[in-house]
């Protein structure tokens, strides 16, 4: 599928609701456990999404559209481990919902044309990237973390499914 801003917004607007439905009102074991080692729990993932809403997508869009200096500030992919301390999952989800709603309003108000999507910024690792690539990445990032939450939760029953593990790739793929 070719990039379409309004199709992208369809996904971006729904992500907080999907995560809220997946995680609200369930046992702490589903929320706090991870895949082992230094992997992330659903709680960690929501904290990461909150941090991204504050410091990544919209900030980088503004750099591309408005700033003379097109260099992006590096994104701290692990900031949630300090930023989320002391917050409940419900608090993080509510914060994510509010930030995303505000960001979607700002995104719609930009009334971008196709030429705006070809404007560029400078990513610290990738170099020159377009606004279209940034916005496409935002959508895929959301979908990837929804899938990650489902995978982390599924793996909590990996040993419980017995021989069916062979037919459940969510349990064997990273």
Image: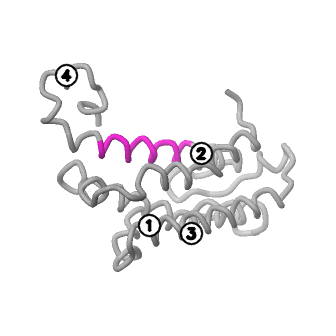
User: Which one is in front in this view, the residue at disc 3 or the one at disc 2?
Assistant: 2
State the residue in front, 2 or 152.
Answer: 152
Q: Which residue is mark 3?
A: 55
Q: What residue is at 75 percent from the left and 69 percent from the top?
A: 67
Residue 103: give x, y in percent of width and height: 68, 63
Q: Residue at the spot x=40%, y=57% of the render?
A: 45
Considering only order in the chain, which callout, 1 or 4, is on the residue closer to the N terminus?
A: 1
Q: Are marks 3 and 1 in contact (CB under 8 Å)?
A: yes
Q: Is residue 141 magenta?
A: yes
C-alpha span from label 4 to label 2: 32 Å
Distance between mark 3 and mark 1 Cα atoms: 9 Å
The first of marks 1 and 2 along the sequence is 1
Instruction: Say which mark, if any, is on residue 76.
Output: 1
Upstream in sequence: badge 3 or badge 4: 3
Q: Position of residue 116 (x, y in %)?
A: 82, 50
From the image, tell me which residue sits under label 4: 164
Q: Nearer the viewer, mark 4 or mark 1?
A: 4
- Distance, label 3 to label 2, CA atoms, is 16 Å
Residue under numbered circle 2: 139
Q: Single out the mark in the foreground, 1 or 2.
A: 2
Image coordinates of residue 125 in percent, x first then y, are 49, 54
Kindly state the secondary structure of the residue where label 2 is placed.
Answer: helix
Per the image, label 1 sits on a secondary structure element best described as loop
> Dot 3: what SS?
helix
């Amino acid at each position: 599928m070719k990039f379409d801003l309004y199709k992208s917004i369809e996904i971006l607007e729904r992500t907080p609701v999907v995560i809220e439905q997946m995680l609200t009102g369930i046992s702490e074991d589903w929320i706090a456990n991870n895949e082992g080692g230094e992997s992330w729990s659903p709680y960690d993932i929501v904290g990461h999404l909150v941090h991204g809403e504050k410091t990544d997508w919209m900030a980088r869009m503004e750099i591309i559209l408005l700033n003379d200096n097109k260099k992006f500030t590096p994104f701290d992919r692990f900031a949630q481990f300090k930023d989320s301390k002391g917050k409940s999952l419900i608090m993080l989800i509510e914060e994510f919902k509010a930030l995303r709603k505000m960001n979607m309003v700002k995104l719609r108000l930009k009334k971008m044309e196709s030429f705006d999507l070809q404007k560029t910024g400078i990513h610290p690792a990738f170099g020159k990237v377009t606004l279209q690539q940034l916005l496409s990445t935002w959508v895929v990032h959301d979908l990837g973390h929804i899938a990650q939450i489902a995978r982390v939760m599924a793996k909590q029953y990996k040993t419980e499914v017995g021989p069916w593990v062979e037919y459940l790739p969510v349990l064997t793929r990273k």
